[in-house]
Image: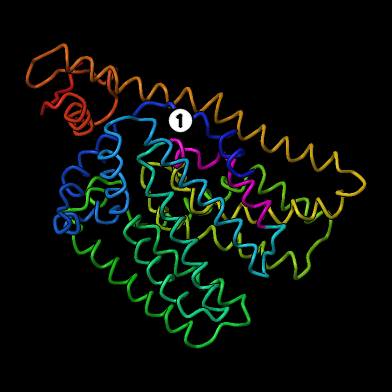
Amino acid sequence: MFLLLVWVAYGATANLGFISDDYVYIVKAREYAWPGDWPSLFRDPLYRCRATTIWITGALEWAVGVRAIPFNLASLVIHLLNVWLIYRLGRWRTFGWPVALVAAAYFAVAERPHEAVMWYSALPDLLALTFSLTALHGLLDWLSGDRWGAIRLSASFLFGLLSKESAVAIVAFLALVLFLDDRARRRHWLVLALLTLLNVAYAALIFGTKDQHLHLQDGTFVFGWHALFVLLNSAARLLWGWGVAALLLLAIWRLATRQTLRPVAFGLLWILPALAPYSFLSYMNSVPSRHTYLANLGVALVVGVAGHAAWRRWGQRHTWAVVALAAAMILHNASYIWLVKRPAFEMRSAYTERLIQRARQNPAQPLPISNRDFPFSPELARDTILVRTGQFREVVFVK
């Protein structure tokens, strides 16, 4: 069922072409992942926080070459894996299987974080959620008496830090589980404290190389009180639509019980630390689509609680109402991706293809191009040309 839902919503992704940023990862994979210059990778202040994507990109190019479809399918597979891991959270009694089923189904088709699934360069955002979820499952195993769960928890946390800076939020997610689970003991909190220290060291490494870190030098992230507005605005935008509808239904039905409040609270509290690392953006007043992928799990849990409540309320006498509600949710999300976002991504891919054609037809060095032909940076243009033509070309923008 989950495979079908992912394909109905995101099958539009499969045959999209590469976008310029995708070539950056291919260049970095050639530099770091193959033949395996990992010391240089870990000295890179930006891409060491995306090491897992570098490794996956290197493996994909080695296996299939520079072909967009296998790369797009890799993103879909990881999205599907995340959907399955969300469903598996149903074994935790705070959620239960019915809530987890609806939450996973919603997450499979949700359009709000579409960019993370449709754009291969956003793979780090997918992986940040993957390792957040495997860390949660490791903790749940440990709470159930499986000592190996602590090892899986720690390994997932480390791989999360090697996937995206936002993975520091894993500590907050684990704390939420321990607060809500009666089986939590001092040893669990002690491990969480040790992981928090790793977070501090991780942050120190990032800010210690501030003068070399692209996003801390180009003005993308700026510390200031504007972050609070960005955080709250982004959370509200993420909840808007199905998340708000779910909360309204629960309020109208007066379902403020322990059974509903705990998973809803978990979902709402999940959103804030997941968005917090991106709230210092300076060029937008809300977090971009791809960076909401991790936080969207919180919305999915709220929708999961409301969906389960709707089934209990209408399931036997008004099954058609539940079916109609589910169909509307799927149609709304899938149609937006296919009819609005797919054409936008095709346009972005077309810019890249036109640049490649121009590079092949024009031997000038440096290559003159206009912002209308390629509205991205010269560095992206250079990497795109290098991968597709094998030529190292400097690029200069002209009017």
Taking the image as shown, residue 44 lies to the left or right of residue 267, namely left
Give the SS element for disc 1: loop
Figure check: 141 above or below 44: below
Residue span colored magenta: 100-118
Residue 105 in magenta?
yes
Figure check: 227 above or below 22: below
| Residue sitting at x 61%, y 56% | 87
Percent across and percent down for residue 364 are 8, 15
Disc 1 marks which amino acid?
Ala
Percent across and percent down for residue 101 are 67, 53
Figure check: 394 above or below 262: above
Residue 121 in magenta?
no
| Residue sitting at x 13%, y 19% | 367
Colouring mode (rainbow / by chain / secondary structure / one colour): rainbow
- Quadrant that contains the N terminus: top right
Q: Main secondary structure of the magenta part?
A: helix
Percent across and percent down for residue 19 are 33, 30
Label 1, residues with CA under 10 Å away: few <14, some 14-19, many ≥20: some
Taking the image as shown, residue 104 lies to the left or right of residue 255, namely left
| Residue sitting at x 24%, y 45% | 218
Residue closest to the eye, 342 or 59? 59
Number of marks present in the image shown: 1
- Quadrant that contains the C terminus: top left
Query: Among all residues in the image, which is located at the extreme left?
Result: 365
Residue beneath label 1, please? 14
The quadrant holding residue 350 is top left
Taking the image as shown, residue 52 lies to the left or right of residue 314, namely left
| Residue sitting at x 28%, y 71% | 201
The quadrant holding residue 370 is top left
